[in-house]
Image (tube, helix red, strand yellow):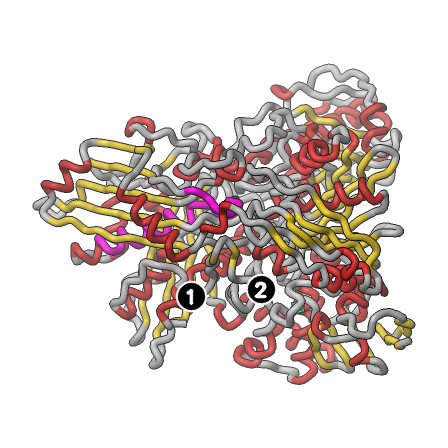
Amino acid sequence: MITLTVNGKEHQFNDDGDMPLLWALRDILKYTGTKYGCGKGLCGACTVHVDGQPVRSCITPVSAISSQNITTIEGLSEQGEHVVQQAWQTLNVPQCGYCQSGQIMSAVALLERKAKPNDKDIELAMSGNICRCGTYQRIKQAIHLAADLATEVKGS
Amino acid sequence: MNQIENVSRRGFLKKLGISSTALVLGVQLPSMLTIPKALAGVVGTDKFIPNVYVQIGLDNIVSIVVHRSEMGQGIRTSIPMIVADELGADWQKIAVVQGLGDKKYGSQNTDGSRSVRRFYQPLREAGASARMMLQQAAANQWQVDVSETSAINNTIVHEKTGRELSFGSLVAAASELTLPEQSTLILKAKKDFNFIGKSDVALVDGKKIATGKTTYGFDVELPNMQYAVIARPPVLGAKVKSFNADAAKAIAGVLAVVQLPDLEEPAVFKPLGGVAVIAKNTWAAIKGREALAMQWHESEHQSYNSDEYKKALATSCDNPAKILRSKGNVNKALSEAKQVLKASYYVPELIHVPMEPPAAAAHFHDGLFDIWACTQTPQSAQSSVAQSTGVAAENVNINVTLLGGGFGRKSKPDFIVEAAILSKQLNVPIKVMWTREDEIQNGYYHAVSYQKLAAGLDQQGHVNAWQHHVAEPPIGSTFSKGADLIGSEADLGLIDMPFDIANVSCAAGKAPAHTRIGWMRSVTNINHAFAIGSFVDEIADAKGLDSKDNLLALLGPDRKIDFSLENAKYGNYGETLDKFPVDTARMKAAIEKVSKMAKWGRKLPKGHGLGISMHRSFVSYVACIVEVSENSDGKIKVEDVWLAVDCGLAVNPERIRSQMEGAAIFALSYTFYSELTAKNGVIEQNNFDSYQIARFADAPTTHVEIIDSDAPPGGVGEPGVPPIAPAICNAIFNATGKRYRELPLKQYGIV
Ligand code: FES
Ligand code: FES
């Protein structure tokens, strides 16, 4: 038995410890905001935070993360009030939206590491997240906007 | 307004599950034209009397049914914009309802860039007739003439007295009235639009996406649902020889192993066959599938090897089997030309890779199906499931989820049929999920193409001969086994070549298919626009002309082209030439516009180059300029893309811009990276490492301007794609002097 802490809530997990976290979250614990795109760590659609670090849940076995805190898109802010979620909505970033949970989780992790990233920082941090719809340009703008929003929030 | 009578709509209300206290206006819409030939006629579900429904509740909420699939193009925002505008609705008081698959809506087949193109007028009429009934109901109550009333923010207003009645309060009275005649409908003037043409409407699903609360096909969860993955034949048509069901069942969590019927070609939308592993969760199903140790019989298609196939296509171009357009005498003109230019172009087989692979959940119970799927085409899903399972189509309920991208893949419902067959056989709800490997290796592919072009220049240097031969396996082969000549693919940028040239010949050679050939965003426009857009630039170079001047000169005088005068049967995307002409004036205007945007002719930094191209598709016009740079290692980067778009009246400019930004990335992916190859009939690529698409660092800055137009709305989702690849290659030529004629460009080591 493994205890998984997802968005602050504890769950008992009784299945195969080799199961990638992605399927544990989606099929067993029903956090379907985290998406499958490749299953091989190539696209970033499945990105979640484990103790604040972005990880690809499709290649992370459940057994590897027993006592750590997992944050999924659902755990950022229910009402979409996180600055990154705000920026995404303001700029109408998504097209189909399917990659965006992963994009947002990668962007949040970047901003936590670096409050004011430049274009190069963004390119590097986001290079593992594919968007087939091609929203990269707006993602870049939205990350800059989120950084600005965060400073405003702190300043006020 | 005419006298309005009572109508009973109770049966209809029941069917929709809508309470009869709501005013429901079932608006009978005028019949549509036939659907675009390239994408039509495969399964005859398209009917031409669509209905669009507006439901207004006592709570003053306007529900608008979106009957088309949302896959990133923004249709769940654009359709409500159109209806709400004519209705006078308050954007904060609307609810967007996704329509079930049902013939009553007319075609729901969301491809061919036609949701707005085909439904703009009917949707406006739907909104207007609802609004006029509400106005009449209010006018009756106030005992005033209806012309003194107007609708704004879910309220009918009597301007003279300032009296107001909410839509919700008029539900009962309006329900007593009958529908106005179509001829009496009063539509808004463009200047009065509140939503249409405005860029400040937020995405309907924007907040849900940002909070992870959306439901895609992959996300559907039903009580007691089981999870399935399927081992499908690696070569098209290969039948199952043997498999180890016991080994699969020995994996913890595996519940059942089911062999599906082998595929008999033509493939149409039938399942490919193979063996399904059903489990308690996806992981167990995947593990179970690995344990099957599948063995397959041989298939005739294992002769398919990409290297040899490419050579065969090149040979086929020299022996065309069908002349598609002919004007004057090309052979004579070429033989008498002062100079003849020739070039060949190649685009490999491609695949959609929507971020969400296909997925469908089916529940068979009480003799009927409830199905949830990320489908572009709920009606052909319905008929395909009916055909394969013997359950009547009206007992197949198709709920359309959000689509994590479509690009044409999800207008083939084979994956939905798989889920239906399994649920019926096992009597439990089943979700079938395709892994990325499945999606790439068992797809409906964009046809590989070889093209040979020749142009003859006369004494004065005028182009007076144009010959274009293509060989590409046809979409028709998926629906008729053995078909080896393109049909309506020729209408997609081949026979509609718009240049003013005296002698023209377009022809196709045979190309037998060895995979399921399908349609992918902008379809064969991809191949044809790449070849034509590159070749005219080669002509410019040969003539020593500026690329843009050459393009304008070749387009010739302003005119509307009728290709039937040149022995071509041109489908014009299912539209009449009257309504949607092939207009060279609009082409030239787009070219001029984009040239201004990009400051064509300016002095460029060292190693930079600009390239230009223009293409009309899906009855819209897109001109493109690309700026590339070459670094000291000889690597190319696309810096900027400028797109000038004339898509007629722009309904949702914000989403038009996002579609164009996306089109640039989609085209950049196949220009630089994507390629499928087959070895002994098996596709060799299987995930994003071997089948690459553009990533963050590849993304240019894309600048979009929409040309103001009152022409009827044209396509938006696809037309941005075709001109990008030739513009990139033309820019690379201008930057480096190197001309690349085969995609993807990564083979040249420049990325
Ligand atoms: S699904 Fe995990 S990286 Fe693609
Ligand atoms: S928005 Fe569709 S894949 Fe990114």
Residue B12 sits in which quadrant?
A: top right
Chain containing the residue with disc 1:
B
Q: Secondary structure at mark 2?
A: loop
The range drawn in magenta is B512-539
Residue A126 sits in which quadrant?
A: bottom right
- The numbered mark, 1 or 2, whose residue comes first in the sequence reads 1
| Mark toward the viewer: 1 or 2 | 2
Q: Is residue B592 visible?
A: no
Height in image: B451 above or below B249?
above
Q: Residue at x 84, y 25 (%)?
A: B173
Residue B150, position in %: x, y? Answer: 70, 33
Most foreground residue, B230 or B385: B230
Which residue is most to the bottom? A113
On the rendered image, what quadrant is the C terminus of chain B found in? bottom left
Residue B640: image tag: 1
For label 2, the residue is B687
